Image: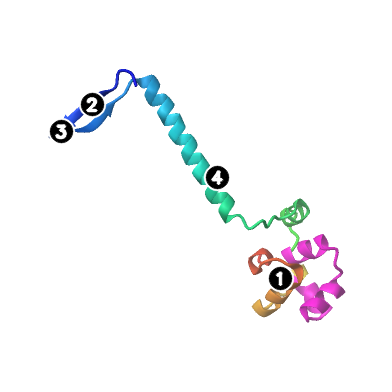
Amino acid sequence: MTNIQFIERNGQREYAIVPMPLFIRMAALLEERGDEALYDQAKAADTGFRVPSAVVNQLLAGAHPVKAWREHHQLTQDALAAQAGISTAYLCQIETGKRQGAVKTLKALARALGVSLDDLQG
């Protein structure tokens, strides 16, 4: 290395003074390593779950999450209600916002749709 100066204390090197061009290259390399570590962390935490754009678009348009996911899976209200063990009328009331739906019911709907409970709570 060129032109690196050291500051010593009690005979031990404690600080290094490096030229700015070298410092800039080192800082860029350290930032890249930090970025790589963040990427690796995010990749390790990735469950693979993605929300399809059709669902996102419906949610942004104001649709109830249950309805958005049901339609994404191309299920009728009758089919989803049967899978969740509830009446079609109850499902309709949930989708239109007339009823909130008990946690037990929403869990059953989430299981039937293959999503988490959080994904159904708008």
Say whether disc 4 or disc 3 marks the residue closer to the N-terminus.
3
Which class describes the residues within 10 Å of circle 2: few (<14), some (14-19), or many (20+)?
Answer: few
Which class describes the residues within 10 Å of circle 4: few (<14), some (14-19), or many (20+)?
Answer: few
Count of all numbered marks drawn on residues in the image: 4
In contact (CB < 8 Å): disc 4 and disc 3:
no
Determine whether the residue tagged by mark 2 lies in a helix, strand or loop. strand
For the point 51% across and 40% down, which residue is it?
35
Residue that label 1 marks: 110
The magenta stretch spans residue 13: no
Query: In the rendered image, is residue 100 in sight?
Result: no
Residue that label 2 marks: 6
> Residue 53 in the image: x percent, y percent?
75, 51
Q: Is residue 49 above or below residue 15?
A: below
Residue that label 4 marks: 39
Amino acid type at mark 4 = Tyr
> Residue 58 in the image: x percent, y percent?
77, 56
Residue 70 falls in image quadrant: bottom right
Q: Distance between the residues labelled 2 and 4?
A: 35 Å
Residue that label 3 marks: 9
For the point 69% across and 74% down, which residue is it?
106
Residue 73 falls in image quadrant: bottom right
From which residue to which does the magenta span run? 65-94
